[in-house]
Image (spheres, rainbow, N blue to C red):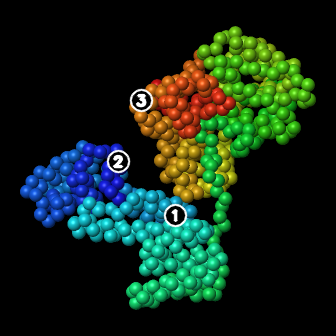
Amino acid sequence: MGVRLLGPARVDGDATLRPRDLRVLSALAVRRGLAVSAPELAEAVWGPAPPASWPKQVQICVGRLRKALGVAVVETVGNAYRLQVDAVDLDVTDFEQLVVRGRVLVQAEELDRAAATFARAGALWQGAPFRDLDGWSPALAERLRLEDLHRSLDEELLDARLRCGEHREVAGRAEALVAEDPLRERRWAILARAQYQCGRQADALRSLQRARRLLLEQLGVDPGRELVELEAAILRQEPALLSVPAQRVVSGDCPYKGLSWYDTGDRLYGRDREAEACLARLQSSPFLVLAGPSGCGKSSLLRAGIVPALRRLGRSTLLLVPSPDGGLDLPGRSDVDPVPVLVVDQLEEVFAAAHGVEQVRATCARLAAHAREVGPVVLAVRADHLAGLAADSSLGQLVEQGLHLVSPLSEGALREAIERPAADAGLRIEEGLVDLLVRDTEGEPGALPLLSHALAETWLRRDGNVLTVEGYRATGGIRGAVSRSADRLYEGLPPEQRPVVRSLLLRLVAPSLDGDPVRCRVQADRLRGSSDRERVLALLIRSRLVTAQDEVVEISHEALARAWPRLRS
């Protein structure tokens, strides 16, 4: 549970604690990790003249804190109490750790990550801490220390951003910081450097002269070494003052698709050779079948690999998927030359248990007739439904000639699929993350959508423009990212809306006769009907667990049914 002390004291999600309880909690947090005697707590809460009943009142406050935060959070040590900082999410501790981490990143020249880390620390600051303990000297000393750290944080954040090349944005913010505390020399130095990098040399020199005058008038001292050397460097117009790293163009969009497939407008990495092999097979056979287990990348190879490759060769394509009722509306003969290549994705939906055998046979016969009499056919089907294509003997012969088993990505191709989208988006990947992803993916069946989802969740937790090992581990990894994000969505809903999630998702998955569940495509208007259903459906789409296209809704991938225990059960 989160304890917020930077600003008004509060405990996340708990309205039962009284002001006196929060003052006891604040006093324990002032000396976090150390024992605080009961008399000291009484002095912190009531001042130098506590009531006669203070021993009992302190015990009652500690009891309520344990009930709200957990028994282990406040430990009894003789006649004293200690706050176990590892057992609670304390914003004061998070604030200090983020500042330290940012400084380490500055030393490592990881300036964009440092700026992002400093910004996260600044976002925790909601005001001066421990204001409810004004009369207690340990709290006053700790508040002054943290306020000074916060002032330094503002400067370190601007300095990191300035060194990243964000001088125009920094100049305006530095003006405001100088106005807040004009006697802090570092703020004047940041302002002058930002103005100089903006091409405003005269403004930079005027800022330094104002700083000199204020320091003499207010404190009776000359500027320090940093301001003196900076003024001299500006007068000499030293090139180093304008030296900033080349800025990457960073996309604001996530470069990974999550559970969704890569579509015709997306760049697919790691499958170029396989797409070429499929095109070569299509030269000798009018029928190409991409088969493999769920999650191996069939749809992405079909849509973002083979279809664009055909179009580059001048061949038009017609992409179809089975309708929500399992039908497949094949086109007739065409006068167009050459005839468009018929591309069918997710053919396994035809074999879902809800569809009759006669419908399956008719669809198979029509596919065979189209390939023999009209034009080439490329389709993707889950491997556990390959036998269903033998419902028509002529189609079975075509499948035998044009079968391509979609293989797992090799290690090199997997690295390319991880690294290239990040590079295209202007992102960097922390050393060791790719090795960890490759290792976690090995031996994981249907891993590609799970990997892509974990990368999308890692992108949400990025440090500046860097995808980090820490961010990836926080997702739950390849095996846990889907479950964790889906459970977070489910548990974040009001209790009355959770049955709506269950109702919607169970209509989007059907049991198959001989394999894993098959996703079902359902007309969106059949899922709506109330404001709750509208809101929940929109939330599922926004979270990428569900996809909506052309007023048809489906779960983003069958991997959701495998990787989310709540849905699987």
SS of the residue under disc 3: helix
Q: Which mark is residue 496?
A: 3
User: Which residue appears at 70% of the width and 9% of the height?
Assistant: 358
* Residue underneath mark 1: 114
Q: What amino acid is found at the position of numbered circle 3 in the picture?
A: Glu
- Where residue 282 appears, as percent x and y from the top left, is 83, 30
Left or right of 7? Residue 39 is: left
| Residue 39 seen in the figure | yes
Quadrant in the rendering for residue 51: bottom left
Outermost top residue: 358
Do tag 1 and tag 3 residues touch (Cβ < 8 Å)?
A: no
| Residue density around tag 2, few if under 14, some if 14–19, many if 20 or more, within 10 Å | few
- Where residue 158 appears, as percent x and y from the top left, is 52, 69
Give the spatial CA distance, label 3 vs label 2. Answer: 22 Å
User: Which residue appears at 83% of the width and 26% of the height?
Assistant: 376
Give the spatial CA distance, label 1 vs label 3. Answer: 42 Å
User: Which residue appears at 58% of the width and 88% of the height?
Assistant: 232
Q: Nearer the viewer, mark 1 or mark 3?
A: 3
Quadrant in the rendering for residue 404: top right
Q: Which mark is residue 12?
A: 2
- Where residue 433 appears, as percent x and y from the top left, is 56, 51
Mark with earlier residue (1, 3): 1
Q: What amino acid is found at the position of numbered circle 2 in the picture?
A: Asp
Q: Which mark is residue 529?
A: none
Q: What amino acid is found at the position of numbered circle 1 in the picture?
A: Ala
| Residue density around tag 3, few if under 14, some if 14–19, many if 20 or more, within 10 Å | few
Do tag 3 and tag 2 residues touch (Cβ < 8 Å)?
A: no
Outermost left residue: 52
Give 3 or 70, whichever is nearer the viewer: 3
| Residue 28 seen in the figure | no
Mark with earlier residue (3, 2): 2
User: Which residue appears at 11% of the width and 51% of the height?
Assistant: 56
